[in-house]
Each structure stands twice: as C-alpha cells, then as structure tokens.
Image (cartoon, grey):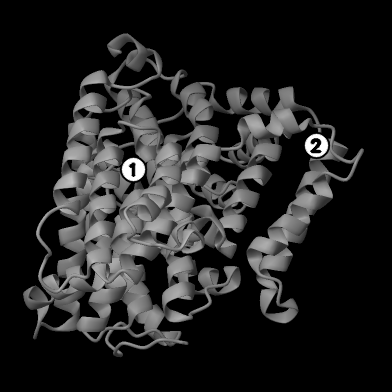
Amino acid sequence: MINNARRSGLNPNAAFIGFIIAWIAFFAILYAPPLAGLKPEGQKAAAVAVWAVIIWITEAIPVGITGLLIPLMLVMTKAEKDIGKAFGGYTQDVTFLVLGSFIFAAIMQCTGMDRRIAMAVLSRVKPQVDQVLKGFMAVNTVLGVFVPAAVSRAAVLLPIVKGVSALFGDNEKGKRAVAALAISGICYFPMVAGILLLTAHLPNVIMAGLFDKQLGYQMSYARWFWLHWPIVGLYPIMFIMLRKLFDVKDISIPGGVDFIKEEKTKMGKTSLVEWFVIAVFGLAVIMWITEPYHGIKTGMATLIALGIFFIPGLLPVSWQAVQSKTIWGTFLLLAGAMSMANAISSTGLAKWLADIAHPLFIGQPFLVVVVGVILVTAVIRIFMLSNVAAVSMLAPIMLSLAKVLNLNPVAFTLLVCNFDTFSFIIPTQVTACVIAYGTNTFNTSTYARVGIPIMLVTLIYFMVIMMPWYAFNGLPVWGGYVTWK
C-alpha cells in the first residue's frame, strides 16, 4: 500500500494518517450528543465539513474526488436530503462559467496562445530585473482574462521564469534576482490579477454563487470588475516593495532580450486558428460584460461561445487533446466546495458558528471587527493549502457573521475572503506559491520575510482603498445587514 501511495504521488505518512483522522473526526461529530443551538442537519454538515478540511490539509484523497464525495456524504448523512440540492454546486450558473473557462484555457494551450501572449508582453520590456517584474504584472493581468485559475497562470509562466533565471550566474545578485522573479511572477502577481476578474480566481466564483443563492445579489462579470478594478493599485506597491526587499533595482539580465526574442521567434506569426480563438473568446467576454442588456447569464454565454469552437472544421484540435489539458479535478473540487458552502449556510451551521464568534466582537467598532476577523482567518489559513477550500468554508460563515454583527454581508465577505488570497506566510498556503517554491530559487524564511510585510500593506490597502470603494458603490460594510431578495 505504501508503494502504491508513492506511485500515485501521495505522501504515504500524511495520506494514511490524514485519512484515518478524517474518518475518526467525521464519526465523532456525527454521533456526538446534540450540540446546543445547532440543528441535527447542521451537526451532520459539520461532520462532512471537518472531514473535507482534514482530507484537504493532508491531501489524503485527490481533491477532485473530494468534490464528488462531499455532496454524496451530505446525502448519505441526511444533512441535505434532496439530491439536487446536495449537488447544487454542480448546477449553478457560475459553475458552468468556470467549466467553460477551463475548456477555453485548454484550447489556448493546445494552440499555444497562452505562451504567445506571455512572450508578446515580455518582449517589450528592457533586460533588467525590475523591468521584467513590470512585464510580469502586465502578463498576469492579460492572462487573467483568458486563463481562469491562478495556478494555471503560474504553470504558464513557470517555464518562462525558469528560462530567464537560467541566464543568471551563481552569485548573490543572481540569487536575489531569480527569487524576486519567481515569487512575483508565479505567486504574488497572479493573486492580484485573480481578484480583478470574476473568472480569474475560483474563490471569486464561490462568493458570487453564495451572494446569488443566499442574498439574491447578482454579481455579474462587469459588476465584479467594477468593484475590484482598484486592486491594480497593489501592483506598483508590490513592485516597489519587491525591488527594495530583494535589492534588484540595478540588476541586468545577461542575454535576457535574446532569450525572450528567440522564444517568440520560434512561435512564428499568429496563425489564423489563433486569431479565431481570440475572436471567439472576445465574443464570450463581450457577452459577459453586456449581460444586463441581453439577460443571458455568464455561464450560458460561455457555453454558447464554446459551441462555436466545435462547429465541424473550424478548430484543428481534437477533443482528446482539449480534454487532456482541461483541469477537471479543479472543476470537481470547485463544484463540491460550492455544494458544501451551500450546505453550511442552509443547515444553519454557518449561523451557529457566527453566533459563537459574535461575543468576541460585540460592541466593537466595525473597523476593529473587520481587521480582527481578517487576522484570525489569516492564522487559520496557515494550515490549509487550497484557497478554494478555505473560501468555501469561510464565505458562508462570514455571511452569517455579518448578519449577527449588523454589517453589510457582501462587503464584509469580500474584504475577508479576498484578503485570504494574499496568505503569504508560508508557500504551502497557496497552490501557485507551491509552484513558485518548486523552482528552488528561495527558501521559506525568505518567503516569510517578504510575504508578511506585503500582507500587512495589503491589509492597509484593503481598509483605505477597497472598503471605501465598496461603500461608494452602495456596499458600505458599516451600513447594516441587507439582502436583495
């Protein structure tokens, strides 16, 4: 069994121990005496949620499989008796938006458009480390439109970062430079781009689905962008901090221009097929933005655009190639996590947990409450790898906590859960940062030395810029609990 676990890519010790502990915790909660104030369905949902968190932390089971098992366990425990509701995360409009975006991203990979976009942007910067950092900002923003998951964007940029990093010698300056490039290009900047666009980060989709289902608040693609475009202000702040913390202001890249130009030349001119891919994706984006006018939800608009790709004879890429590059496991994780988030709310578990947390913040100014909750969740996140998993747990609790604290539920949840994306204490908190760490260009102490100051500055930015901006757009966190139903 141990050898089989290793061959499947698991850490045997963590997987076996995590698997056993998860089931012990599950049955302990499921058959525990009734908890005061919590409905039986809520206690059953808690058992499933704790099981899922332990499995996610230890990676005992592939995350995609947990996405299928979570709603199954909700049905089997009767936390949610209706199969349709238990698997509700699989049928929400935003779920189809994400699935369609994943298939779009796979098509772009098959045609080479993702790498072409990255090289086109980087070829325009000067061969200096700080200038390449600026290029990575632009690349991540552009890729955020086309590539829906931060980890997917990190995967696109990984070979580019490695290629540029290989140009440096084994000296102190070179080590600082490659660490700055890896941390910024693969880890930090993808997170900023992820907050900017609804489809660029999976936790965004979880929150949008909850707002719709629990509050009746429709978070369209255009509305999300309008609420979050000020997040781009973090780019120059991070750039200045990274340049200072790594001291890379005057470091040039030996042969950097030649490497990037050579890679771009290998690709040749943009083909007719690539222009076709851009045109169809452009149609999808236009439909997302104009949803208020035509009434077609973003998920359905995405499927319409996808259908165009597969008109016979238009796309010279086989379905086998597309499906091999589609991240089905992440889609299953997302749908399962959304099902769990819905159950945490509908069974009363979120309200029960919010009632427990309420005394800690009662009577405190709203700013103290928001900052306090953010800091508490930041500590909790040290133990969780998946941002998707974390937000699927946190978002429904934040909605209920906002109600008992009489805060605006949308603004409060956005502030807390968006900040969760910037969990930069250790690399294992964010999957994209694990990819960056895998380049072996920095150690955990360097990561924390840079990440913690950036987290603190980001927290200040959220309080000073994002919170007032939400208020300006009708979502004041201090404005009391409201719904749109």
Residue closest to the eye, 239 or 408? 408
Residue 284 coordinates in the image, percent (x, y): 72, 59
Q: Is residue 462 left or right of residue 356?
A: right
Circle 1 — which element?
loop
Tell me where residue 14 sits by quadrant: top left
Classify the position of the N terminus by image quarter: top left
Picture residue at 34% right of the left edge, 44% below the top: 386
Task: Looking at the picture, tell me which residue is in the foreground, 71 or 368.
Answer: 71
Can residue 250 be seen here? no
Q: Is residue 40 above or below residue 106?
A: below
- Label 1 sits on residue: 430
Which tag is nearer the camera, tag 1 or tag 2? 1
Residue 11, how many percent across, how many down? 28, 21
Q: Position of residue 225 (x, y in %)?
A: 54, 68
Asked whether residue 447 appears in the rendered view, the answer is: yes
Viewer-side residue, 96 vs 161? 96
Looking at the rendered structure, which numbered label has been put on residue 270? Answer: 2
Tell me the number on the disc at residue 145. none
Instruction: Tell me residue 159's x, y (percent).
Output: 52, 25
Q: Are marks 1 and 2 in contact (CB under 8 Å)?
A: no
Q: Amino acid at mark 1?
A: Val
Circle 2 crowding by C-alpha within 10 Å: few under 14, some 14–19, many from 20: few
Badge 2 marks a residue whose secondary structure is loop
**Please, what is the three-letter code of the amino acid marked with disc 2?**
Thr
Residue occupying the point 36% across, 57% down: 392
Q: Residues within 10 Å of mark 1 (few under 14, many from 20)?
A: many
Task: Of the two numbered discs 1 and 2 on the same chain, state the one appearing first in sequence.
Answer: 2
Residue at left offset 7%, top offset 77%: 359
